[in-house]
Image: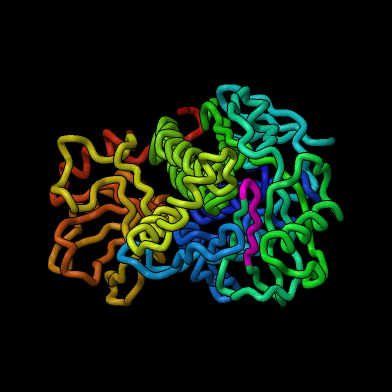
Amino acid sequence: MSSVVIVGAGPTGLALACGLAASGVPVRIVEKRDGPATTSRALGLQPRGAEVLDRLGALADLPERSVRISRVVTHVNGRQMASLQVGRPTKLVRRPGLLMSQTEVEAALRKRLGALGVEVEWGKELLSVTQDASGVTLTFPGEQLRSAWLVGCDGAHSLVRKAAGIDFPGVSVIENFLLADVQADLPLPSDTVSVWLRADSMLGAFPLPGDHVWRLMAPARPDATSPGAGTVDELTRQLRHHAGLDPSVVGRVLWSSTFRIHRRLASTYRRGRILLAGDAAHIHSPFGGQGMNTGLGDAENLAWKLAMVLHGAAPGALLDTYEAERRPIAREVLASTSSLTRMVVGDTPLARAARDRVFIPLMNRPLVQKLIWEQSSQLKIHYRRGPLGVRLTERWPLGIPQAGDRVPDVPCTRPDGSSTRLHAELGARWALLVPPLGDGEAHRAVAERHLGPDTPLTPLTPSTAACRHVTLVRPDGHMAWRGNSTASLDTWFSTRLGTTTHRTPENEDT
């Protein structure tokens, strides 16, 4: 019996497989396609998405091969109305967003997964799923497979979700949208996303890595039918209509598609031994570039929890905190991206007036730009209100980081005196941050007793005088606990993670 089977080898499934494999969990990842995707809808990594890949050891040289965007320029009725600065460092955001094809992200994750000894099993189409108290049975053409846990990362039309009987309610936000990746000699800055708005139509042009490669995006006309020449003809028509550019500037068409924008959220992320992540659990508008990054966050959150359960360091009930922490994030993303889409498209005269006279001009204000950039970065995501977050009796003074908050990637020193970064030590490990003049041996002993031998803990000393308390950091970079009392730390493990001392590896405790 396999420990975990992941269905779907997109970014979410690959990231989850990397996290589990790095934690020593036997994992198989299957994909019905015959090989890696060669075309892509998702465009890149927000700063949090890049952090996730960094912690997984899969970021590699993606920053060097990406396009770094510095501005989003918006035109209304042919006239530039706003220049939104993005990528500029703030106190919160230290790394830029990275614009690249989703296929590049998947390739980096597959390379990391291969280094961990796991390969994607291509051409395996899932036919059916049944589960019982001890595991899940998966049926493929000519083969049956038994697994302790199954995770559906198989997209919006997830067979895993349907087999589990999980509802996927939602609505259509926009009937049809057009996409095309083209080689084009566009007279536009290569570090700028350009957007044109006119009445209820729009056009977006996104620079991609390569020789004059651009992603063009626009709403489809009501008579649009299928991808192909019609898609490209309409996009080149929009280039002339919005930007006044001769369609001949578009050379080779690399890929084109039409798609419908939906807003849907799974009613639950877990049913028994079946879990969902990524587009199988939530889909929404691509506006704001949140989709792939939200799926990567799901994968990282689930990986360390599933690993702890399988290693016997926590009961199966820990997996319920995955939905409790991640589903509210998805709900917020669905709401914000739907509002942004309706605002940009301007589906009513009142909405267009508000867009053109209020929202777009506001984007020139530095404070608004900072708020938009920090919100889209996903670095504000926290789990304070989740079951592993802070409780009323544990709250620290205003401005002090709380349990559930993201912990920044700070320089640290290992016990042997060598230098490192906090996030470089996470991924498959927990970290215990000890003040420069503190002694964390007693805290380390408590944590290691609860985590067990298969869940490593790294003691680190932050290179900052601001660290005055012992801080336990989860593998996904969020604060688990802080304080000075070993009794308090012991209580946190037993009441939050449900640990006492090291348990036997999970197979029966769900």
Q: Is residue 203 located in the magenta-colored stretch of the structure? A: yes
Q: Residue 180, position in %: x, y?
A: 74, 58
One can see residue 128 in this view: yes
**Segment tinted magenta in the rendering:** 199-206
Q: Nearer the viewer, residue 287 or 62?
A: 287
Q: Is residue 196 left or right of residue 212?
A: left
Q: Is residue 474 left or right of residue 165?
A: left
Q: Residue 277, position in %: x, y?
A: 56, 40
Q: Nearer the viewer, residue 59 or 173?
A: 173
Q: At 67% across and 50% down in the image, what residue appears?
A: 9
Q: Nearer the viewer, residue 61 or 241?
A: 241
Q: From what the image shows, is residue 307 above or below residue 35?
A: above
Q: From what the image shows, is residue 125 above or below residue 53?
A: above
Q: Residue 75, position in %: x, y?
A: 56, 61
Q: At 44% across and 67% down in the image, what residue appears?
A: 85
Q: Is residue 272 left or right of residue 314?
A: right
Q: Quadrant of residue 125?
A: top right
